[in-house]
Image (cartoon, grey):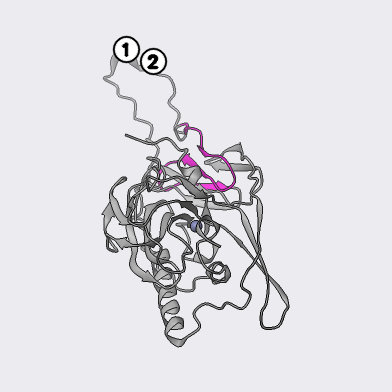
Amino acid sequence: MRGAAGCFSTPLFLSFLFLVACTVATSPAEPAPMPVEPDAEAPADPVAGPEIDAAPETSIEAPELADCYGALKQGGLIICPAMPGSLVELGEMRLIAGASGTVQYGLPRTMPEEIDILRGNVTTTLTIAPRNDELRVVPGFDCDKVDARTPAQKAHAADSWEKKQTGFSLFYPGRGALDGFILPADARPSSPFGPTRQYIGVSKTNGQPCESMSVHQGFDLATPVGTPVYAPAAGTVTLADPDLYYEGGTIFLDHGQGLLSVFMHLSEVDVAAGDHVERGAMIAKSGNTGRSTGPHLHWAVKWRNPDTDNRGGDYYIDPALLLELPVAD
Ligand SMILES: [Zn+2]
């Protein structure tokens, strides 16, 4: 299993990653947006003269909001203009519009093909295109392989896990996907987001067949070691570590609005936690570190509900779909 076939030498890690819900979540909330009050009706001005009866009754209803838009496909993202501080319901999800005047909702990879969006008292329905992710059978799986075997490896893996939970729990203000995303490295894609990989093999110790399933949660780029990695959108670094156990050199970059990019297997990390970077800034060099099976850049984007401290409900969306959003100058 090399190159595009996998990011890690075993999918067990993936199960571990996605099954364990975060129990520590302290989220510095986005600064409370200023509530926007509809303008009160202006008192009639007795000296306004002849223009008084020309003025029509003014409505004090909220202004009409632009349509929601985005990458309208399972695993994509909806952007809905909304008054800062107002509640928007997207299907079952309830979000508060941020200071950017939008809510941005990452669409689960498996979701209904229609979603109702309630803003104020107006409901609109959007059609969401289905995915057709394939199932890939990966034979020759090493059933007996167990990662983090020695006490030192286990300690390293546990320490890495703690660091990641902290990185996932930090929220910074930002424009999310509002200004679009660019490819984080000048390289061709080597493995898309979405396919389920079914690893099958036979144990050498007991002769029994075994299998393991995992969904590829990132978008891999075929980068030789040392390829510059750029911020795909502006953001604030919440984790920068040269040596996590599975992920190797790793950066988490919070774009705001709940969107967080994850870069793994880096050979060089050129930012520090807390740094703010603009879109296109060089943040790292790609590599083959951690439990990588060949040089590549693993770029994943996690959508986190900014309005809850429960990090267990967060999930990954398809980075390639973010590249379809309009990119601001
Ligand atoms: Zn990957």
The residue that disc 2 covers is 53
Q: Which residue is mark 1?
A: 50
Contact (Cβ within 8 Å) of mark 2 with mark 1? yes
SS for callout 1: helix
As rendered, which of 50 and 218 lies closer to the eye?
218
- Quadrant housing the C terminus: top left
Give me the residue at 61% from left, 42% from top.
116
Q: Could you tell me residue 21's position as x and y percent?
A: 53, 70
Farthest bottom residue in view? 151
Corner quadrant of residue 101: top left
> In the image, residue 325 lies at what x, y percent?
45, 38
Q: What crowding class fits label 2: few (fewer than 14 Cα within 10 Å), some (14-19), or many (20 or more)?
A: few
Is 243 in front, or is 6? 6
- Residue 220, position in %: x, y? 48, 53
State left or right for residue 18 relative to residue 174.
Answer: right
Q: Position of residue 58 (x, y in %)?
A: 43, 26
* In the image, residue 80 lies in the stretch drawn in magenta: yes
* Gap between marks 2 and 1 measured at Cα: 7 Å
The magenta span reads 64-90
Residue type at the position of mark 2: Asp
Q: Could you tell me which secondary element the residue under label 2 belongs to?
A: helix
